[in-house]
Image: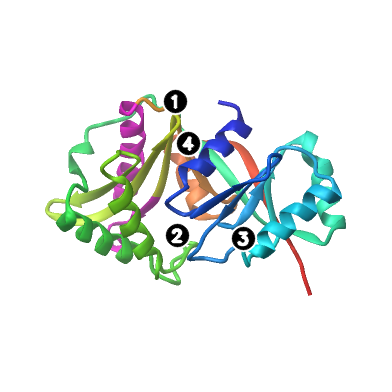
Amino acid sequence: MKNNLFLQNYQHLQYGIMYNKLVDLGFTSIAWCEKYDSSFFNHAQVDSLLSKDSLNKIETTLRNLERKPAVYFENRQNLSGLVDFLTQQSYKKNWEDSWMFHSGQYLNEDLFNQVRKVGNETSLEEFLKTFDACYQKDDPQNPYGELGDYLDVAKDAWNKHSKSGKIEYFTIYDGKKPVAVSTLTNFAGIGYISNVGSLKGVRGKGFGKIASLYCVKQSVDNGNSEHALATEEGHYPNEFYKRIGFKARFTALGYVKEEK
Protein backbone atom coordinates (compact mmCIF):
# COMPACT_ATOMS: atom_id res chain seq x y z
CA MET A 1 0.00 0.00 0.00
CA LYS A 2 1.46 3.37 -1.02
CA ASN A 3 2.02 5.84 1.79
CA ASN A 4 -0.50 8.39 0.52
CA LEU A 5 -3.20 5.72 0.24
CA PHE A 6 -2.31 4.48 3.71
CA LEU A 7 -2.81 7.98 5.15
CA GLN A 8 -6.12 8.36 3.34
CA ASN A 9 -7.35 5.04 4.70
CA TYR A 10 -6.06 5.90 8.17
CA GLN A 11 -8.18 9.05 8.14
CA HIS A 12 -11.27 6.97 7.43
CA LEU A 13 -10.16 4.41 10.00
CA GLN A 14 -10.38 7.13 12.65
CA TYR A 15 -13.79 8.37 11.43
CA GLY A 16 -16.29 7.78 14.20
CA ILE A 17 -13.47 7.28 16.72
CA MET A 18 -11.26 10.38 16.91
CA TYR A 19 -12.81 12.21 13.94
CA ASN A 20 -16.47 13.17 14.10
CA LYS A 21 -16.57 14.68 10.62
CA LEU A 22 -14.64 14.41 7.36
CA VAL A 23 -15.10 17.33 4.95
CA ASP A 24 -14.24 16.51 1.33
CA LEU A 25 -13.01 19.54 -0.62
CA GLY A 26 -11.97 17.47 -3.63
CA PHE A 27 -8.26 18.20 -3.41
CA THR A 28 -8.17 17.46 0.33
CA SER A 29 -10.14 15.86 3.14
CA ILE A 30 -10.45 17.76 6.41
CA ALA A 31 -10.77 15.88 9.69
CA TRP A 32 -12.69 17.47 12.57
CA CYS A 33 -12.87 16.28 16.17
CA GLU A 34 -15.70 17.58 18.33
CA LYS A 35 -14.14 16.82 21.72
CA TYR A 36 -10.58 18.06 21.22
CA ASP A 37 -9.47 21.23 19.45
CA SER A 38 -5.84 20.12 19.00
CA SER A 39 -4.64 20.40 15.41
CA PHE A 40 -3.46 16.80 15.77
CA PHE A 41 -7.15 15.85 15.42
CA ASN A 42 -8.30 18.78 13.25
CA HIS A 43 -6.48 19.31 9.96
CA ALA A 44 -6.50 19.04 6.19
CA GLN A 45 -4.66 16.02 4.80
CA VAL A 46 -3.01 16.79 1.46
CA ASP A 47 -0.92 14.91 -1.08
CA SER A 48 0.06 17.67 -3.49
CA LEU A 49 1.33 21.24 -3.57
CA LEU A 50 -1.23 23.89 -2.69
CA SER A 51 -2.15 27.19 -4.30
CA LYS A 52 -3.12 30.26 -2.28
CA ASP A 53 -6.72 29.68 -3.33
CA SER A 54 -6.78 26.05 -2.15
CA LEU A 55 -5.07 26.98 1.13
CA ASN A 56 -7.65 29.71 1.64
CA LYS A 57 -10.43 27.11 1.25
CA ILE A 58 -8.74 24.94 3.89
CA GLU A 59 -8.38 27.87 6.26
CA THR A 60 -11.98 29.00 5.77
CA THR A 61 -13.34 25.49 6.37
CA LEU A 62 -11.34 24.94 9.55
CA ARG A 63 -12.19 28.39 10.91
CA ASN A 64 -15.87 27.70 10.26
CA LEU A 65 -15.40 24.54 12.32
CA GLU A 66 -13.79 26.74 15.02
CA ARG A 67 -10.37 25.16 14.56
CA LYS A 68 -6.94 26.54 13.68
CA PRO A 69 -5.79 26.15 10.06
CA ALA A 70 -3.58 23.05 9.93
CA VAL A 71 -2.19 20.84 7.16
CA TYR A 72 -0.91 17.25 7.39
CA PHE A 73 1.13 15.53 4.68
CA GLU A 74 3.75 12.89 3.96
CA ASN A 75 7.31 14.11 4.42
CA ARG A 76 8.73 13.34 0.98
CA GLN A 77 11.01 15.08 -1.49
CA ASN A 78 8.43 16.15 -4.07
CA LEU A 79 6.42 17.91 -1.35
CA SER A 80 9.36 19.93 -0.04
CA GLY A 81 7.92 22.92 -1.88
CA LEU A 82 4.83 22.63 0.29
CA VAL A 83 6.96 23.18 3.39
CA ASP A 84 8.39 26.35 1.86
CA PHE A 85 4.95 27.57 0.79
CA LEU A 86 3.35 26.97 4.18
CA THR A 87 6.25 28.64 5.96
CA GLN A 88 5.75 31.72 3.76
CA GLN A 89 2.07 31.72 4.79
CA SER A 90 2.96 31.85 8.53
CA TYR A 91 2.66 28.11 9.16
CA LYS A 92 5.05 26.31 11.51
CA LYS A 93 5.78 22.62 12.03
CA ASN A 94 3.80 21.44 15.04
CA TRP A 95 4.40 17.69 15.01
CA GLU A 96 5.97 14.88 13.00
CA ASP A 97 4.62 11.33 13.08
CA SER A 98 6.95 8.41 12.52
CA TRP A 99 4.83 5.70 10.88
CA MET A 100 6.14 2.28 11.85
CA PHE A 101 5.22 -1.10 10.40
CA HIS A 102 5.67 -4.74 11.37
CA SER A 103 6.05 -7.50 8.80
CA GLY A 104 3.72 -9.81 10.73
CA GLN A 105 6.34 -12.56 10.63
CA TYR A 106 8.40 -14.38 13.25
CA LEU A 107 6.02 -13.75 16.16
CA ASN A 108 6.74 -15.68 19.35
CA GLU A 109 3.27 -16.68 20.51
CA ASP A 110 4.40 -18.49 23.69
CA LEU A 111 3.03 -15.79 26.02
CA PHE A 112 -0.06 -14.82 24.05
CA ASN A 113 -2.21 -16.95 26.37
CA GLN A 114 -1.87 -14.09 28.86
CA VAL A 115 -4.02 -11.88 26.63
CA ARG A 116 -7.81 -11.56 26.88
CA LYS A 117 -10.00 -9.73 24.39
CA VAL A 118 -12.55 -7.34 25.87
CA GLY A 119 -15.93 -8.87 25.16
CA ASN A 120 -18.44 -7.38 27.59
CA GLU A 121 -19.09 -4.41 29.87
CA THR A 122 -17.32 -6.01 32.83
CA SER A 123 -14.10 -6.70 30.92
CA LEU A 124 -14.38 -3.24 29.32
CA GLU A 125 -14.40 -1.57 32.73
CA GLU A 126 -11.35 -3.61 33.78
CA PHE A 127 -9.58 -2.61 30.55
CA LEU A 128 -10.37 1.09 31.10
CA LYS A 129 -9.23 1.00 34.73
CA THR A 130 -5.94 -0.66 33.74
CA PHE A 131 -5.51 1.68 30.76
CA ASP A 132 -5.92 4.69 33.05
CA ALA A 133 -3.38 3.33 35.53
CA CYS A 134 -0.81 2.76 32.77
CA TYR A 135 -0.82 6.41 31.67
CA GLN A 136 0.37 8.74 34.42
CA LYS A 137 2.08 12.14 34.36
CA ASP A 138 5.83 12.55 34.90
CA ASP A 139 6.51 9.13 33.39
CA PRO A 140 9.67 9.22 31.19
CA GLN A 141 8.41 6.24 29.18
CA ASN A 142 5.05 7.92 28.52
CA PRO A 143 5.23 11.24 26.63
CA TYR A 144 1.42 11.55 26.55
CA GLY A 145 0.61 12.10 30.23
CA GLU A 146 -2.69 11.27 31.88
CA LEU A 147 -5.65 10.12 29.80
CA GLY A 148 -8.33 12.36 31.30
CA ASP A 149 -11.40 12.62 29.05
CA TYR A 150 -9.83 10.24 26.53
CA LEU A 151 -11.16 7.37 28.65
CA ASP A 152 -14.68 8.43 27.69
CA VAL A 153 -13.64 8.48 24.02
CA ALA A 154 -12.20 4.97 24.37
CA LYS A 155 -15.36 3.67 26.04
CA ASP A 156 -17.60 5.25 23.41
CA ALA A 157 -15.46 3.88 20.56
CA TRP A 158 -15.71 0.32 21.88
CA ASN A 159 -19.48 0.60 22.31
CA LYS A 160 -19.86 1.87 18.74
CA HIS A 161 -17.43 -0.35 16.88
CA SER A 162 -16.62 -3.55 18.77
CA LYS A 163 -19.52 -5.56 17.36
CA SER A 164 -18.46 -4.83 13.77
CA GLY A 165 -14.87 -5.84 14.55
CA LYS A 166 -13.51 -2.44 13.59
CA ILE A 167 -12.06 -1.95 17.06
CA GLU A 168 -10.67 -4.55 19.49
CA TYR A 169 -9.37 -4.03 23.03
CA PHE A 170 -6.99 -6.40 24.79
CA THR A 171 -5.98 -6.77 28.42
CA ILE A 172 -2.78 -8.59 29.36
CA TYR A 173 -2.52 -10.43 32.69
CA ASP A 174 0.22 -11.39 35.08
CA GLY A 175 -1.52 -14.38 36.59
CA LYS A 176 -4.95 -12.96 37.45
CA LYS A 177 -3.81 -9.35 37.67
CA PRO A 178 -4.39 -7.05 34.66
CA VAL A 179 -1.09 -5.27 33.97
CA ALA A 180 -1.13 -4.01 30.37
CA VAL A 181 -3.48 -3.05 27.52
CA SER A 182 -3.55 -2.48 23.77
CA THR A 183 -5.98 -1.61 20.98
CA LEU A 184 -6.30 -2.78 17.39
CA THR A 185 -8.41 -0.88 14.86
CA ASN A 186 -9.15 -2.59 11.52
CA PHE A 187 -10.05 -0.81 8.29
CA ALA A 188 -9.32 -1.26 4.57
CA GLY A 189 -6.44 -3.68 5.10
CA ILE A 190 -4.88 -1.68 7.94
CA GLY A 191 -4.42 -2.99 11.45
CA TYR A 192 -3.69 0.14 13.50
CA ILE A 193 -2.14 -0.47 16.92
CA SER A 194 -2.62 2.08 19.70
CA ASN A 195 -3.27 2.60 23.42
CA VAL A 196 -0.39 0.31 24.37
CA GLY A 197 0.59 0.65 28.01
CA SER A 198 1.78 -1.28 31.03
CA LEU A 199 1.79 -0.60 34.76
CA LYS A 200 5.01 0.92 36.10
CA GLY A 201 5.45 -1.98 38.49
CA VAL A 202 5.81 -4.53 35.68
CA ARG A 203 7.94 -2.52 33.25
CA GLY A 204 10.84 -4.49 31.82
CA LYS A 205 9.05 -7.83 32.12
CA GLY A 206 7.84 -7.97 28.53
CA PHE A 207 4.14 -7.14 28.97
CA GLY A 208 4.28 -4.12 26.65
CA LYS A 209 5.90 -6.31 24.02
CA ILE A 210 3.19 -8.93 24.43
CA ALA A 211 0.48 -6.26 24.18
CA SER A 212 1.95 -4.86 20.97
CA LEU A 213 2.83 -8.07 19.17
CA TYR A 214 -0.48 -9.72 20.03
CA CYS A 215 -2.12 -6.90 18.07
CA VAL A 216 0.16 -7.70 15.14
CA LYS A 217 -0.85 -11.37 15.35
CA GLN A 218 -4.53 -10.43 15.51
CA SER A 219 -4.12 -8.05 12.59
CA VAL A 220 -2.57 -10.85 10.52
CA ASP A 221 -5.42 -13.19 11.51
CA ASN A 222 -7.92 -10.50 10.48
CA GLY A 223 -6.42 -10.47 6.98
CA ASN A 224 -4.86 -7.02 7.12
CA SER A 225 -1.86 -6.31 4.91
CA GLU A 226 -0.51 -3.44 7.02
CA HIS A 227 0.25 -3.68 10.76
CA ALA A 228 1.12 -0.17 11.83
CA LEU A 229 1.40 2.44 14.55
CA ALA A 230 2.59 6.03 14.89
CA THR A 231 5.23 7.42 17.26
CA GLU A 232 7.56 10.40 17.35
CA GLU A 233 11.30 10.24 16.81
CA GLY A 234 13.30 10.90 19.95
CA HIS A 235 10.70 9.54 22.38
CA TYR A 236 10.86 6.25 24.28
CA PRO A 237 7.98 4.54 22.40
CA ASN A 238 9.80 4.98 19.08
CA GLU A 239 12.89 3.18 20.35
CA PHE A 240 10.79 0.51 22.09
CA TYR A 241 8.95 -0.42 18.91
CA LYS A 242 12.18 -0.59 16.93
CA ARG A 243 13.49 -3.11 19.46
CA ILE A 244 10.50 -5.40 19.04
CA GLY A 245 10.51 -5.55 15.25
CA PHE A 246 8.76 -2.45 13.92
CA LYS A 247 10.46 -0.39 11.22
CA ALA A 248 9.86 3.26 10.36
CA ARG A 249 8.66 3.54 6.75
CA PHE A 250 7.97 7.26 6.49
CA THR A 251 7.17 10.36 8.52
CA ALA A 252 4.29 12.81 8.13
CA LEU A 253 4.27 16.47 9.08
CA GLY A 254 1.66 18.62 10.77
CA TYR A 255 1.92 22.35 10.02
CA VAL A 256 -0.26 24.85 11.90
CA LYS A 257 -0.81 28.52 11.09
CA GLU A 258 0.52 30.97 13.66
CA GLU A 259 -2.21 33.57 13.99
CA LYS A 260 -2.17 36.75 16.05
Asked if the residue under mark 1 is in contact with the one under mark 3, i.e. CB atoms within 8 Å, the reply is no
Q: Who comes first in sequence, dot 2 or dot 1?
A: 2
Instruction: Tell me if residue 248 can be seen.
Output: no
Q: Is residue 235 visible?
A: yes
Q: Which mark is drawn over residue 246?
A: 4
The image's mark for residue 39 is: 3
Q: CA distance from mark 2 to mark 4?
A: 18 Å
Tell me how far mark 3 sits from mark 4, CA to CA: 27 Å
User: Residue 208 in magenta?
Assistant: yes
Q: Is residue 69 above or below residue 76?
A: below
Residue 190: x and y in percent read: 45, 33
In the rendered image, which residue does mark 2 sit on?
141
Query: Is 92 left, or right, of 14 in this rendering?
Result: right
Q: Position of residue 97 (x, y in %)?
A: 59, 48
- Numbered disc in front, either 4 or 1: 1
Q: Observer-nearest residue: 142 or 10?
A: 10
Disc number for residue 29: none
Identify which amino acid the numbered label 1 is placed on.
Answer: Ser
Compute the Cα span from label 3 to label 1: 29 Å
